[in-house]
Amino acid sequence: MMIRSIFAMFCLLAGAAQAAEKNMTAEEIKAHARQHREFADIHLQAAQCLEAGKPYKECDEALKKACKGKASGPHCGMRHKH
Protein backbone atom coordinates (compact mmCIF):
# COMPACT_ATOMS: atom_id res chain seq x y z
CA MET A 1 0.00 0.00 0.00
CA MET A 2 2.90 2.35 0.73
CA ILE A 3 4.32 1.86 -2.76
CA ARG A 4 0.94 2.74 -4.22
CA SER A 5 0.80 5.94 -2.17
CA ILE A 6 4.31 6.92 -3.19
CA PHE A 7 3.56 6.21 -6.84
CA ALA A 8 0.32 8.21 -6.70
CA MET A 9 2.15 11.14 -5.09
CA PHE A 10 4.85 10.97 -7.76
CA CYS A 11 2.19 10.99 -10.48
CA LEU A 12 0.47 13.98 -8.91
CA LEU A 13 3.70 15.93 -8.63
CA ALA A 14 4.74 15.05 -12.17
CA GLY A 15 1.30 15.96 -13.45
CA ALA A 16 1.30 19.26 -11.57
CA ALA A 17 4.73 20.15 -12.91
CA GLN A 18 3.69 19.34 -16.46
CA ALA A 19 0.43 21.23 -16.02
CA ALA A 20 2.25 24.30 -14.73
CA GLU A 21 4.43 24.29 -17.82
CA LYS A 22 1.34 24.33 -20.01
CA ASN A 23 -0.45 27.11 -18.04
CA MET A 24 -3.41 24.87 -17.26
CA THR A 25 -6.38 25.98 -15.21
CA ALA A 26 -7.05 24.52 -11.77
CA GLU A 27 -9.83 22.33 -13.21
CA GLU A 28 -7.55 21.08 -15.98
CA ILE A 29 -4.89 20.23 -13.42
CA LYS A 30 -7.44 18.27 -11.36
CA ALA A 31 -8.58 16.37 -14.45
CA HIS A 32 -4.96 15.65 -15.36
CA ALA A 33 -4.28 14.35 -11.84
CA ARG A 34 -7.37 12.09 -12.03
CA GLN A 35 -6.07 10.67 -15.29
CA HIS A 36 -2.71 9.88 -13.68
CA ARG A 37 -4.50 8.13 -10.79
CA GLU A 38 -6.50 6.02 -13.25
CA PHE A 39 -3.32 4.92 -15.03
CA ALA A 40 -1.60 4.26 -11.70
CA ASP A 41 -4.48 2.01 -10.64
CA ILE A 42 -4.47 0.14 -13.96
CA HIS A 43 -0.71 -0.41 -13.76
CA LEU A 44 -0.94 -1.45 -10.12
CA GLN A 45 -3.50 -4.09 -11.05
CA ALA A 46 -1.15 -5.37 -13.77
CA ALA A 47 1.74 -5.54 -11.28
CA GLN A 48 -0.39 -7.41 -8.75
CA CYS A 49 -1.48 -9.84 -11.46
CA LEU A 50 2.15 -10.60 -12.30
CA GLU A 51 3.14 -10.83 -8.64
CA ALA A 52 0.33 -13.34 -8.09
CA GLY A 53 2.13 -15.64 -10.50
CA LYS A 54 -0.35 -15.40 -13.32
CA PRO A 55 0.97 -15.74 -16.86
CA TYR A 56 2.31 -12.58 -18.46
CA LYS A 57 -0.07 -12.94 -21.40
CA GLU A 58 -3.09 -13.03 -19.08
CA CYS A 59 -1.95 -9.93 -17.16
CA ASP A 60 -1.10 -8.08 -20.36
CA GLU A 61 -4.54 -8.81 -21.81
CA ALA A 62 -6.19 -7.53 -18.60
CA LEU A 63 -4.04 -4.38 -18.81
CA LYS A 64 -5.07 -3.79 -22.42
CA LYS A 65 -8.74 -4.33 -21.60
CA ALA A 66 -8.67 -1.94 -18.63
CA CYS A 67 -6.79 0.65 -20.65
CA LYS A 68 -8.92 0.48 -23.79
CA GLY A 69 -10.01 3.95 -24.85
CA LYS A 70 -7.82 5.66 -22.25
CA ALA A 71 -4.37 5.47 -23.81
CA SER A 72 -2.61 4.64 -27.00
CA GLY A 73 0.11 2.12 -27.53
CA PRO A 74 0.41 -1.55 -26.70
CA HIS A 75 1.27 -1.13 -23.01
CA CYS A 76 -1.18 1.48 -21.75
CA GLY A 77 1.21 4.38 -21.97
CA MET A 78 4.22 2.61 -20.45
CA ARG A 79 7.32 3.52 -22.41
CA HIS A 80 9.91 0.92 -21.58
CA LYS A 81 11.05 -2.28 -23.14
CA HIS A 82 9.42 -5.61 -22.36
Image (cartoon, rainbow, N blue to C red):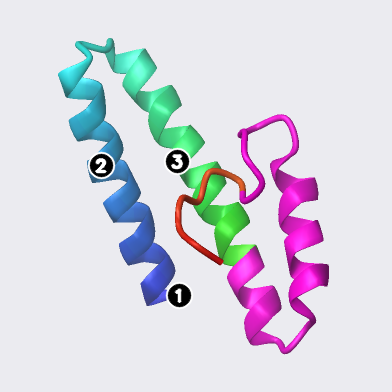
Q: Which residue is mark 2?
A: 14
Three-letter residue code for mark 1:
Met
Residue at horizontal 46 percent and vertical 50 percent from the top? 79
Res 1 → quadrant: bottom left
State the extent of the magenta-drawn residues as a range.
Answer: 46-75
The tag on residue 60 is none
Q: Which comes before the other along the chain, label 1 or label 3? A: 1
Q: Element type at marker 1?
A: loop
Q: Which comes before the other along the chain, label 2 or label 3? A: 2
Three-letter residue code for mark 3:
His
* Relative side of 58 to 53, left or right: right
Main SS of the magenta part reads helix
Depth order, front residue of 16/82: 82
Could you tell me if the residues under marks 1 and 3 are in contact, i.e. CB atoms within 8 Å? Answer: no
CA separation, marks 1 and 2?
20 Å
Q: Element type at marker 2?
A: helix
Depth order, front residue of 19/1: 19
In the image, residue 32 lies at what x, y percent? 41, 27
In the image, residue 80 lies at what x, y percent? 45, 58
In the image, residue 3 lies at what x, y percent? 38, 73
Could you tell me if the residues under marks 2 and 3 are in contact, i.e. CB atoms within 8 Å? Answer: yes
* Relative side of 70 to 60, left or right: left
Q: Which residue is mark 1?
A: 1
Q: Which residue is mark 3?
A: 36
Res 8 → quadrant: bottom left
